[in-house]
Amino acid sequence: MQYSRELTHHQLMDELNELQINHEELNISYIGESVFSKPIPLVTLGDRSAQKSVLYVSTHHANENVCTSVMLNFIKDYLEAYERYGQMYQINTRYLYKMRKIYIVLMLNPDGVEYRLNGIREDNPIKDRIINYNGSADFSKWSANGRGVDLNHNYNAYFEEYKEIEKELGITSGSAKYSGEYAESEPEVSALANFIRLHMDEIEGVMTFHTQGEEIYYKSREKSLPKAEYVSRLIAKITGYKQAESKGTGEYGGLTDWLIKEYGKPSFTIECGKGENPLPTSQITDIYLRLKEILFTFPILF
């Protein structure tokens, strides 16, 4: 079975629990909680003794939730290949499991996803404020987290500079690209940043998955790490996506910028699919097939 629909946080947890029942090698833990106390699951594929790891992150934005289903498809295919002692793209999955850990945050923004798919609950303590931010009770295009912050502008990468730009552009709470009161103000971003800091010595590379545009971002203010140049070209070759450089507001507060600026870690923002967010679920399978090879091969590039 392939995952071909969007999932709420509750449905995601059910799917993960089912996978864990059927696959004892699957490790599920949590990096923290969202604004409204939803646990943010972390899937680990790989042996605890593995010295190197990579990190995949999806669904910073609620209207990019198709990426969660893409990650689930990868996890399912990895586990099935592992159990049959199979190879994926000439990589022995038993060897991969032993030598590399793959950390996967499937849904960083569960509250925002809940707004988008089910609307805002009557008992939400900031219901009126959020509806005012949104401009209506129609949350079908909502991208921010539970209190109106764009999670991928909340990292500490040129954050203070961006606050001045926000003022100039009139970007306020609930608007796309609103960065929050201070860097890592949002529990989702704080939880992920703390996890990365805790595992910094072993994490060799990061891919964060967004939609749309079929582009690969791997620089921060034109700064590129030598390894990232090579890997980005390989990602482009495998996926058919284009290498690109961030401009304007895209240069501030993102996970990729933070990792390059603060830690010198190769990090890649992958913009998947084409169209207008939220992309139709009919694109999930195509996005996964375009990404599948790099999802399996990325860990051994480091």
Image (spheres, grey):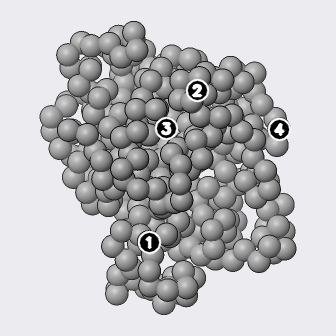
Left or right side of 147 for 162: right
Please state which amino acid type lies under the numbered disc 4: Glu
Would you call the spot at circle 1 few (<14 residues within 10 Å), some (14-19), or many (20 or more)? some
Comes first in the chain, label 4 or label 3:
3
Single out the mark in the foreground, 2 or 3. 2
* Residue at the extreme bottom of the image, as rendered: 128
Query: Could you tell me how far apart the alpha carbons at marks 1 and 4 are, in whole angstroms?
Result: 34 Å
Residue 35 visible in the shown view: no
**Nearer the observer, 279 or 72:** 279
Callouts 4 and 3 close, C-beta under 8 Å: no
Q: Position of residue 150 (x, y in %)?
A: 60, 64
User: In the figure, residue 259 lies in which quadrant?
Assistant: top right
Q: Classify mark 2: helix, strand or loop.
A: helix
Query: Could you tell me how far apart the alpha carbons at marks 1 and 2 are, in whole angstroms?
Result: 31 Å
Comes first in the chain, label 1 or label 4:
1
Residue placed under numbered mark 2 in the picture: 235
Please state which amino acid type lies under the numbered disc 1: Ser
Left or right side of 94 for 144: right
Residue placed under numbered mark 4 in the picture: 222
